[in-house]
Amino acid sequence: MLSATVARRNLVARRRIQGEITFSAIRTTVLSSSFSSFLEIVDNNNNVESSSSGSRRSKKSSWRSTFGNNESSTSSSSSSSSGVGRPGAGGRYDHHQYHRHHRSHFFSTTSTTAKEDLEEKKAAFDGLKAQIESQIPSEIARLKALKTKYGQEKVGEVTVNMLMGGMRGIVGMLYETSLLDANDGIRFRGLTIPELQEKLPGKRDREPIPEALLFLLLTNKVPTEKEVEALRADLMERAEKFAKECAMNDAGNKSKKNVFDALRALPEETHPMTQLSAACLAMQNDSKFLKMYASGTMKKTEYWKYIYEDALDLIAKLPVVAAYIYKRSCVKEAARKSSEVPTVDASLDLAANFSQMMGFSSNECKELMRLYLTIHADHEGGNVSAHATHLVGSALSDPYLSFSAGLNGLAGPLHGLANQEVLKWLKEAQVALKGDYSAETVKTFVENTLKSGRVVPGYGHAVLRRTDPRYECQREFALKHMPDDEMFQLVSRLYEIVPDVLKATGKVQNPWPNVDAHSGVLLQHFGIKEENFYTVMFGVSRSIGCLSQLILSRAHGYAIERPKSVTSKWLEEKFQ
């Protein structure tokens, strides 16, 4: 009887020790390293009770080496006199007293700056991934209830025109992160662009940083300043680690190839979008989801966790890769041209660092990059890049494969090249008008464009029935930072003239300018004149929206996408 009691006490003590190890390990690892290390610690400690005593001692020793052994920093007598029991120290083990002592000892040896850094990393986990995880049960329950209650209800009709017109207007997919409204424009989790500019924290000037938008898209919650800063630090740490590892491989281990080796193998004249898509595929070997799925140990409910890690890794890596492509293949000036791995400044936000890596370090250009990456990040799920990413991802392809597909769609002339078409037309106008931007002269040029059978690029939109808010915020930026720019003055005059000319034709439902009517002008003004790179910048931005939805799709258990197709003969026979 006595031996059984002692055994139970020993078991309780062991479990307390294991609980202490698990808690300290989780807490300290979240503070001091990446989430992947945190998962490793949790997995290791979950296996303690089932391991042999020898293995347990090994784990305890490992724990001591990782988190500090009090004996190495204090004498046995001082430790004993403090009354603090330690795992394996002998005597009665006081879990709470030991934890207080250990925590005090840990932080007493950490500098203020380091402690703040550790707290930020903890907040990055607590503030984003844990929030997503806490929302999953209620979201799944809501979606199940929606399906149970309304599963047989119709959400719309499909006409032959819709079927033959690129499925335009067909309601056919769930996409949570944004919704396009005909009157208000794009809404990111219900917020318009002016509302984003007003409410999102983390601003360095007026424009929100992309990290704040990413947090909003993933959680449906406006983050706090601390949450944005923590996410910014997390993404920049991922970017810096990636860049440093690749640079070290370049300098030393020539046998270990990386994405930059793959890009160097391509001809310099390869289109920048081709290079970016190929880079995504070349980085797929880094996919945590791919490795876990291949192991056969991952539960379906865990898919999203590894998609999350891949998605944030890819969002962090893309600006580094894109800046490399820009300097390698687009820049002609020797001062900025380079084939070296760009250096990441982890003190900056994602957009400002991207601008700086490209060679544009002015505060105005960094602010422009924040605006550009934010307003191009998402445009609901039906556009080619978002839909392609969603479609490929629904087959459980990892984020590297999925987003490469989205980039290939974005590279198409009917999707991502629109601002280049606008710039080409504006330059033609400058040559024809010879600096005369009077109302009558510009009106005549626009009318002649239409008479020649061409459209006025940058005007009109499939859904919007007003001026695109993305155009408006770019116009505000130009008025503040470049009001005297000649091309901006032409764009402003066109804004006054084109809508009335298009209305007069009686053929245009939406005569107002869209986002592409303005973006190229801003980039040209700040020296980013390589037009074939603009779609790459679009792709870096679009990763924020596409990959946010990819995480949510796996978290909420969306099915593989498999619409029904029919032949034209089937249609003829149906209506005969």
Image: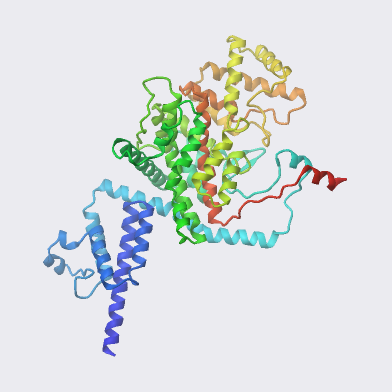
Q: Position of residue 269 (x, y in %)?
A: 48, 25
Locate residue 183 relative to residue 533 in the image: left or right: right
Does residue 114 show up? yes
Is residue 484 depicted above or below 338 in this figure? above
Q: Residue furthest front?
A: 255
Is residue 408 depicted above or below 95 in this figure? above
Q: Nearer the viewer, residue 256 or 401?
A: 256
Q: Position of residue 342 (x, y in %)?
A: 37, 33
Q: Residue at x 43, y 34 (%)?
A: 263
Q: Nearer the viewer, residue 473 or 539?
A: 539
Q: Position of residue 401 (x, y in %)?
A: 51, 45
The quadrant the N terminus occupies is bottom left
Q: Residue at x 47, y 34 (%)?
A: 370
Q: Residue at x 38, y 29 (%)?
A: 339
Question: So how many labels did they put on this image?
Answer: 0
Q: Residue furthest bottom?
A: 1
Does residue 208 show up? no
Residue 260 found in image quarter: top left
Q: Residue at x 62, y 61 (%)?
A: 144
Q: Position of residue 276 (x, y in %)?
A: 48, 35
Q: Nearer the viewer, residue 526 or 324?
A: 324
Locate residue 513 relative to residue 376 in the image: left or right: right
The quadrant the C terminus occupies is top right
Looking at the image, what colour scheme do you see? rainbow
Is residue 562 depicted above or below 167 in this figure? below
Q: Residue furthest right?
A: 576
